[in-house]
Amino acid sequence: MKRILLTMTIISALLTQTACSKSDDPAPTPNYNVNFMANLTGASEVPANPSTASGMSMVTFNSQTKILTATTTYTGVTATAAHIHKGATTVSGPVIFGFSNVASPISYTSVALDATQEADLMANQYYVNVHSAAYPGGEIRGQLIKQ
């Protein structure tokens, strides 16, 4: 009887160890994507303007490939240009990424960002700007904020 009980205890321990082996669990898939969003309005322009146009930009940055992808939509404006600029909320800055197609929805994929561009993006130092004939300096603007 003792021998049967000992054998069953050993078998039970081996089955428990085998069933709970970590090698059976799939490794979690890392998520390298960092998301940003901007609401575009005339009030966010520098200086602010009374435009009733509006828009939204959704940006995903892959921290492994260093590629930025953006989708920008807008209404109420006939765009003549659109870009991502560098600058804080109340500062106008240089164009960093120009969009070749400015018809809504705008789709854009960058080349790999360098370390400075990545640091600026992560520090919310980029904004999306849509320009028009009525507002050549920018009709609607929105700061890209990490989500």
Image (cartoon, rainbow, N blue to C red):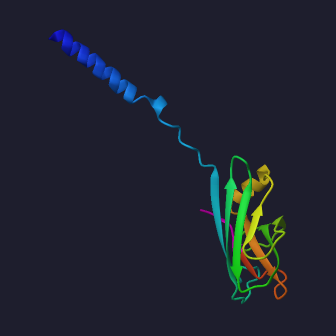
In this picture, residue 140 sits left or right of residue 19: right
**Residue pictured at 51% horizontal, 37% vertical:** 26
Q: Position of residue 115 (x, y in %)?
A: 77, 50
Residue sitting nearer the eye, 78 or 124: 78
Q: Is residue 30 on the magenta stretch? A: no
Say above or below: 62 vs 92: above
Q: Of all residues shown, which one is farthest toward the top?
A: 3
What are the residue bounds of the magenta stretch? Answer: 142-147
Asked if residue 41 shows in the view, the reply is: no
**Residue pictured at 74% horizontal, 54% vertical:** 67
Say above or below: 121 vs 115: below
**Residue pictured at 76% horizontal, 64% vertical:** 108
Asked if residue 80 shows in the view, the reply is: yes
Q: Main secondary structure of the magenta part?
A: strand
Name the quadrant containing residue 125.
Answer: bottom right
Q: Position of residue 57 (x, y in %)?
A: 68, 70
Residue sitting nearer the eye, 109 or 40: 109
Name the quadrant containing residue 55.
Answer: bottom right
**Quadrant containing the N terminus in the rendered view:** top left
Name the quadrant containing residue 76.
Answer: bottom right
